[in-house]
Amino acid sequence: MSNSSSISHFLLLALTDRRQLQVLHFCLFLGISLAALLGNGLVISAVACSHHLHSPMFFFLLNLALSDLGSICTTVPKAMHNSLWDTRTISYAGCAAQLFFLTFFLSAEYFLLTIMCYDRYVSICKPLHYGTLLGSRACAHMAAAAWASALLNALMHTASTFSLPLCHGNALGQFFCEIPHILKLSCSHSYLRELGFIAVIVFLGLGCFVFIVFSYVQIFRAMLRIPSEQGRHKAFSTCLPHLAVVSLFVCTVMFAHLKPLSISSLSLDLALSVLYSVVPPALNPLIYSLRNQELKAAVWTLITGWFQNVQNCCQIFANNK
């Protein structure tokens, strides 16, 4: 029997023991992380630099891109390091930091997706009140509330989880530090306090989910009352990316943590954890860009501007030489 005071490191789950597959996993994680960094970086730069994108919808999209960058930078670098160097260890402090930042960024993403649903609801169901309900100050307050709530949630769960005595070794059944897998290492009955915190966040998450479902019921009812087909298509185009992102994130998280034990398996658990922690940050910029012509045009203008600046610098360097 060991306790948390004697644990200096944890052992993460090895994705595979074969060297060729470890290199393959490293390359896959590298490709996904580069796609996420590029996509979210372009979204952030386009929204920040394009004045015509300074609207509530794109402001919240910028915040979502920041949370995506944070979440993928929390889990993927360590997974890449372990795959490349054939190791499983993560320090006690590193595990606590990883759990804190992952909880923080995933919570922020969920709260921001809920706020973005409210933005779509007001835009379609109450368009005449859009400027009043979603002014710049109101948007800043909602975004600040999302980040502050995520920070409080992360602090609460990290402090509670790592204050528990750990009596069942230090091997985690996940390739990153996650609350349920750390709780499995705790002593009997000592995890009841953390389960209470989890119940609170589940209740809050369920409230956000009910709000999203209710909002989309109202949105679809309002869309059906739009007389012109072009108007219905435009309204649907603004809602489809958000609905796709919410479905990918919420459904995978809920299924991963609420699935029956009878269908649980190591490969399924790994696939689901990748789907909600690694894939969304890479896919979200693509999902939003495909259906949004304004964002697509701003990103293209940004890219062409960068290429033009590089060409000008090369030309100046060649002339001086």
Image (spheres, rainbow, N blue to C red):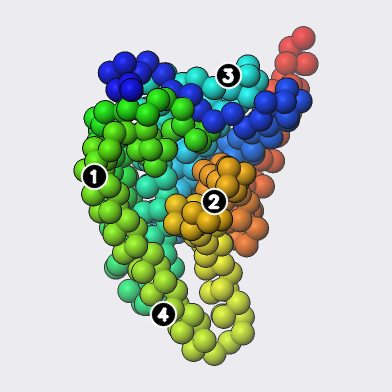
| Mark positioned earlier in the residue sequence (1 or 2) | 1
Q: Nearer the viewer, residue 261 or 291?
A: 261
* Dot 2 amino acid type: Ser
* Dot 1 amino acid type: Leu
Between circles 3 and 1, the one closer to the viewer is 1
In the image, residue 250 lies at what x, y percent? 47, 58
Check disc 3 and report its element: helix, strand or loop: loop
Check disc 1 and report its element: helix, strand or loop: helix
- Quarter of the picture holding the C terminus: top right
Check disc 2 and report its element: helix, strand or loop: loop
Residue at the spot of label 4: 218
Residue at the spot of label 3: 87
Residue drawn at x 53%, y 56% is 262
Between circles 1 and 4, the one closer to the viewer is 1
Residue 5, placed above or below residue 137: above
Cα–Cα span, label 1 and label 2? 23 Å
- Circle on res. 192: 1
Check disc 4 and report its element: helix, strand or loop: helix
Question: Can I make out residue 274 in this image?
Answer: no
Q: Is residue 163 toward the left or the right of residue 8 in the image?
A: left
Residue at the spot of label 2: 264
| Mark positioned earlier in the residue sequence (2 or 3) | 3
Residue drawn at x 61%, y 80% is 230
